[in-house]
Image (tube, rainbow, N blue to C red):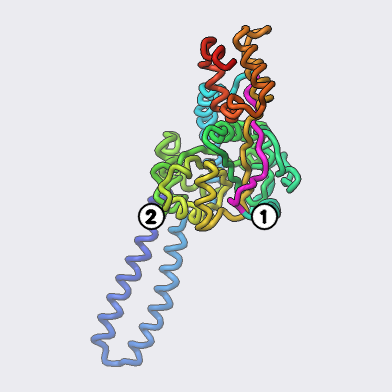
Amino acid sequence: MEVEQRRIWRWIGLLLLVAGTGVVVEYVLNASNRDSASKLVATFLSVASTATGVAVWLGKSPRPTGASRSLLERAADELAEQVRRQWERAATERGLRSPEPISVWWQWSRQQVTGPVKAAVGGARFEPLPGMSAITARKLRSGTIKDLLGVYGGLGSGRLVIHGGPGAGKSGAAILLLLNTLSHRAKFKMTEERARVPVPVLFTVHGWDPDSEPIAGWLAGRLTGDYALLRAREYGRDAAARLIDGGYIAVILDGLDEMAEALRLVALRALDKQATFRLVVLTRSQEMVAAVSGGHLRAAAALELCSVQARQAAEYLASTQTDPAPASWQRLLKHLRDHPDGALAQALETPLMVSLVRDTYVPVVIRSTN
């Protein structure tokens, strides 16, 4: 209803201007007294400008206040629950919710993908999320996946880049960050406090053409298409756009490295200029380094996922076996511990490969390592 009313007011303004202009032109062309005609033109321009301005103002999207804010907060809460269920299933399928998932560490990126750390922590674009403190440069040196929530919620710039090699655990880190953020959001029983924690949504950039479509418009389309609740009549046809504009949405974008090389540069520039929401970008390291030659995501904190060490891999694999472990597994674990720089250790440097070994390594293959 609000959308239709705004459209009607915009048409009223346009019709006023067109109709009035036609009347004045007709009078001026047929007037015998040019002085009177000039005065009429001046009067018309003043009135038309005021009337049209009022119509356009009435047609603008209002800031969410009162009932409309309450409606957006309810939509955000419903969206949060749907997003939580969606990614809880994904986390279970990926083994991210196992009692002791493999520990993944990150460090401040050593690659040339962002600016100085002080730009990320010194910005005042975003206040810390409720219940969190502003992040410091010291806390950005290194940490675990669990520490990502504090980094994300305390960054003044609100911008985070997570990169690593293939299979390094970027998607898993993003899913856990999203779920941890939603858990933090759910702690607040007061609607006003909960609304200050934007709902994180995770999308791949597939289908976005940064050359022709602003990021906010593309995101609104993805939200509306993927979450039926945002198509409900009670929230209006532009519910997704209003959630974005109102600061109720945070965005995690995966797959930047899968875009065409030329589009990566354009996408980074577009995100840098257009993103007004909290933003997390996931990408492979090599592609990110190449992309920033055309301009980086300014004030972002860039975190690089670390390789899994042989000792970590051995401890994790041992925890997934019976105690004592089968003889074949004992030989594998001993080999890992005794040769931390060997070929097997190098093959198990990523969470993906460790998980594959956990799930598919059979005794005959294990025996061949000796």
| Magenta segment, prevailing SS (helix, strand or loop) | loop
Could you tell whether 143 is left or right of 86 in the image?
A: right
Visible residue check, residue 207 = yes
Which disc, if any, is residue 213? none
Residue 257 sits inside the magenta stretch: no
Q: Nearer the viewer, mark 2 or mark 1?
A: 1
Q: Residues within 10 Å of mark 1 (few under 14, many from 20)?
A: few
Residue 309 is situated, as x and y percent measured from the top left of the image, at 66, 29
Q: Which residue is mark 2?
A: 212
Q: Residue at x 59, y 29 (%)?
A: 346
Instruction: From the viewer's side, name the closer residue of 180 and 254.
Output: 254
Q: Residue at x 69, y 39 (%)?
A: 150
| Badge 2 element | loop
Q: Can you tell which quarter of the image residue 182 is in?
A: top right
Q: Residue at x 57, y 32 (%)?
A: 169
Visible residue check, residue 273 = no
Q: Is residue 29 above or below residue 188?
A: below
In the image, what residue type sits under mark 1? Pro
Q: Which residue is mark 1?
A: 116
Per the rendered image, the range of residues in magenta is 100-114
Residue 46 is situated, as x and y percent measured from the top left of the image, at 43, 77
Instruction: From the viewer's side, name the closer residue of 114 and 280.
Output: 114
Residue 105 sits inside the magenta stretch: yes
